Amino acid sequence: MLGKTERRLAIVILVTAIVPLAVAMWFAYSLLSYASSFWLPEVALELDRGIDLYKDYVRAIKDDMKHQTDAIVGDEPLRESAKQHDADACARALAVLFPRYPQLVSLAVEDGGRVLGARDRGRPLDDAAERKLEVRRGLFADGVGPSVLATFAFDRRYERELEQAGFGRERYGQVERERTHVYAGYFEAFAALLGITAVVTVALGLLLARGTTRRIERLANAIDQVAAGNLEVRVPVTGSDELTELARVFNRMLGEMQQSRARIEYLQRIGAWQEMAQRLAHEIKNPVTPIQLAVQECHRKYVGDDPRFRALLDTTLEIVEEEVGTLRRLVGNFSSFARLPHVELRTASLRDFLRECSQQLGHLGAEVAEDGSEEAIVVQDLDVRWEVPDDPMLVAIDRQMLRRVLVNLVRNAVEAIRATSPDIGNGARRGQVVVRAGVSGSAVSLFVEDDGPGVPEAARERVFDPYFTTKSDGTGLGLAIVKKIVVEHNGTIKAEQSSRLGGASFVVTLPLPHPLPIAVARDDSPSRPSIGR
Amino acid sequence: MNATPPRLDRKSPSELLLVAALATLLIATPWLLRLRGSPLVGRPAPDLNFLVLANGGALSDEGLLSIQALRGRPVLLDFWATWCDPCRREAPIVDAAARKWGNRGLVVLGVSTDAPTQADPGEFARRQGLSYPIVRDPSGRASGAYAVDALPTLVLVSRSGTIVAVRTGVTDGDELDRLIREVL
């Protein structure tokens, strides 16, 4: 009941899917571990150092501006002009000083709220690119009196670059903090993907294999039934692959097994009947002769003249001799049935055999009696027609025995017609018998048909049983002998209703020599037109 | 600024195990289902639509016949094929039952498992003089649904639509009559 094949298949698919996946997983794990070992802490240090350097640089620029202001304050002409409050001299001193410092935007000398002198570069500060840096210094050491206000332009580029460097460092730090999670995430995603692949592979593989495993299972179930002794089953033939062929061959094998089993059983049964017939014949035969002789003796020895007693003796002798004759014929039939020789099969042309038979039996009406002696029965009042095809039809037959089959079947037909249709006389035909043959599939069929009353459906199986007869004077051995001979030819025989003549039709089927089993199985395919005949 | 290599998450191998367990369960499901569904007797008859090939009569609806539509009547399904000798031997027995119990409500369906390219089961039935409807199951859907492993198989369905008997191999007339009497 459990699909062993399916289970094995699933395990195989799972293993074939899991093994490479596991290797891939291991590979991915080591790859990520390897990649993470390549993280260089020096990079962060260098980045930090670069930022510090930049900060120092900016600070140096600012200090430089302060130093420049100090230098301006130390200028002697400027100090002198401021001291004197001489605006002209101050302007002159500024004019000399200003070009020396290119970073200056404006330079002014103030005393309290009053501007003593001022000079600028002629264009205002560009707020987008420059930042203002004002440095105020007193001109004199006491801190009171005039002072210098120097306004420098500090390029914003430095500031922005420092900012960006800070961002970069920040991002680097973030990545470093998160990389463990990122790697683990990659690994998990990979694992999940591989897992899904494994599941899908197994499911898909099983789905595809399901049809085949299901059919194997069905075959196994059918074989189980056969093993339990039931030969009356067949495996459904589906699809068109090796399993289909297997099912066909298996079915054919079942058919042959069934046939040979039936054949063996039949032969055993008929063997038992033969043995019984032999004993019966022996037991009857022995006392028959003394009885006959004793009665004959009585009849002959009587010398008296009582006419009534003479008449009684005559009648007695007549009755006894007649009955003894019947018994002798019965005994003859029995022992002929009991001593029925086994067939000796030889390959021969059925066509030639039938033509020969038709010449010997068809015209002369010579028939073989059940006891084996030739007995001429004139069949002038009946039409016996032989329809022999041109196909040679090579089959394994025993000519003598098969001749007996034909004779018995033809005589059976003749007797059946005679028993039912009255003799009109004047040579009028009372009925007809047709013997014909033909190849159908892997067998040859021989038909003996008549237009008599036919065989009742209920009796169609039993007519072949020994001692089963519908005739008043029959022994019921004729058809039993026929069937035994046919079965020994590996053939079958059945009684049907003739579709052509309306009477009985006896169909003898003999197998053609065996082709290869596979070819036979193909040939046995249901498209064969011989079904049901 | 720690310089130690990152540890991979411990969860992943166990996740893989989970996936493997899932796969195993997936594989085991068909068996579990089949184990539970093995005996056909006592279960409701699967509903199917058949293509009628012969003797459809009043049962056939535009050439189709469904099991559902036969609810309320006992149904005998005969799974067979034209090439199957035992099926051919059983056909007259089934036909006799169909004729005998037809007026008591029994519906007999001959479910042919022949492929459409194989012999014509309808023609075969007409030649054999079979009286019951012959339907086709070419794709094997019905055989699958009724777990038919061997031919011939008889499946007897009660008026309420429950499968009451399954017989494989040639069933003799007396046995068939006994089974049918139980569902009438």
Image: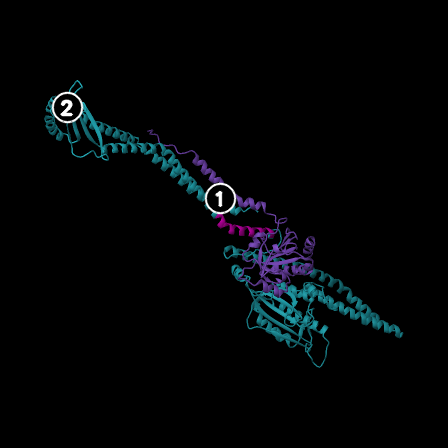
Chain colours: A cyan, B purple
In the rendered structure, the answer to whether residue A231 lies left or right of residue A471 reads: left
Let me know if residue A275 appears in the view: yes
Bin the neighbour count of mark 2 within 10 Å (Cα to Cα): few under 14, some 14-19, many 20 and up: many
Residue at image mark 1: A11
Residue at image mark 2: A73
Q: What residue type is labelled 2?
A: Val
In the rendered structure, the answer to whether residue A78 lies left or right of residue A479 reads: left
Let me know if residue A343 appears in the view: no
Q: Quick one: A134 or A375, which is closer to the camera?
A: A134
Q: In this view, does A151 lie above or below A299?
A: above
Q: Which amino acid does label 1 sit on?
A: Ile
Instruction: Tell me which corner region of the image, top left, top right, bottom left or bottom right, holds residue A122.
Output: top left
Q: Quick one: A34 or B8, which is closer to the camera?
A: B8
As helix, strand or loop, the secondary structure at mark 2 comes to: helix
Q: Which quadrant is home to the C terminus of chain A?
A: bottom right
- At x 46%, y 45%, the residue is A200
Q: Where is residue A26 in the image (x, y as percent from the top left)?
A: 40, 38
Instruction: Tell me which corner region of the image, top left, top right, bottom left or bottom right, holds residue A296.
Output: bottom right
User: Would you say the residues marked 2 and 1 are in contact, meaning their CB atoms lie under 8 Å apart?
Assistant: no
The chain that hosts pointer 1 is A
Asked whether residue B145 is drawn in magenta, I would say no
The chain that hosts pointer 2 is A
Work out how far the residue at label 2 is from the one at label 1, CA to CA, in angstroms: 95 Å
